[in-house]
Amino acid sequence: MSGLTFRKTAEPDQRLDLSILTPAHLANLSLSEITALPIGTTKQLVTVGDIFALSGDDAAAIRFEGGSERFDRIGEAMDDGSIRVEGDAGWRVGRLMSGGRLTVTGLVGGLAGSGMSGGLLTVGGDAGDFLGGPMAGEMAGMRGGAIRVGGSAGARAADRMRRGTIVVDGAVGDNAGSRMIAGTLVVGGLARGAPGRLMKRGTLILCGGAERLAPTFLDNGPADLLILKLMAQEFATGDIGPAPFDGAPMRRIGGDTAVLGKGEIFLPLG
């Protein structure tokens, strides 16, 4: 058996909803049935066959040869198997994901990993706003699993995060970790805005420092904690890959005291 491959043959002229193209949905369908699936988002009908040439027969291992920023909702609600996108992807990549592996080699739009509760989402390029965050009206963002972003991320990464781990190798936009409930966000570059605003619990490890902090955070001084060393070791040997910190002492900031105040931000010393 070979993995089910979707080779892009045409650039879409509308945004596409690819949420149906997951291992669970396609497991019992023939290639002709998959080709006929509607994926358009306007009154103009667009099917899988209009955009992709299909090959392979193993729906547990899906590959997209060629991406597009109009490919929305890839891997949404996937619970097993693997999906690999060779190129860019659009909004809501990996939203509500509960298992499996989703890899995008290029950039992704906003709300990637929104509401995910398990599995691993890997992005080779940049990610948009609300990485791992909630959609409008939702009370919690990411609830488990792990996200790794090789580039930078937009505003409000890890907003309302309840559980899980996000590692961003580059910088993050304004107010990362805002309203955080629990979980861990690691940022290799600069955290812009005021990270951690209104966080109740959780951990932000900001290896490139923060643009500023809200006045309701308290400086606890240098911290040489065993947990930092253990986390660095676990990242390096686990699926998420090496973290942009090595477990050396960092400055601990507690807060946000405007709310529950049991969160923590770690910054470089000096």
Image (cartoon, grey):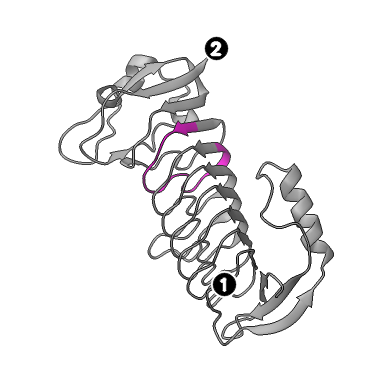
* Discs 2/1, front: 1
- Local secondary structure at mark 1: loop
Q: Which residue is mark 1?
A: 210
Judged from this view, the residue extending furthest toward the top is: 1
Asked if the residue under mark 1 is in contact with the one under mark 2, i.e. CB atoms within 8 Å, the reply is: no
- The image quadrant of residue 55 is top left
Q: Earlier in the sequence, mark 2 or mark 1?
A: 2
Of the numbered discs in the image, which one, if any, rests on residue 1? Answer: 2
Q: Quadrant of the C terminus?
A: bottom right
Give the residue displayed 50% in from the left and 65% down from the top.
159
Q: Of 213 and 139, which appears nearest the observer?
A: 213
Q: Residue at x 37, y 22 (%)?
A: 7
Q: Which image quarter holds the N terminus?
A: top right
Residue 124, relative to residue 21: is it above or below?
A: below
Does 92 appear in magenta?
yes
State the image coordinates of residue 167 (x, y, percent, origin top left).
60, 54
Q: In the visual, does 47 lie left or right of 29? A: left
Name the dominant secondary structure of the magenta segment.
Answer: loop
Measuring 56% from the left and 86% from the top, which residue is drawn there? 258
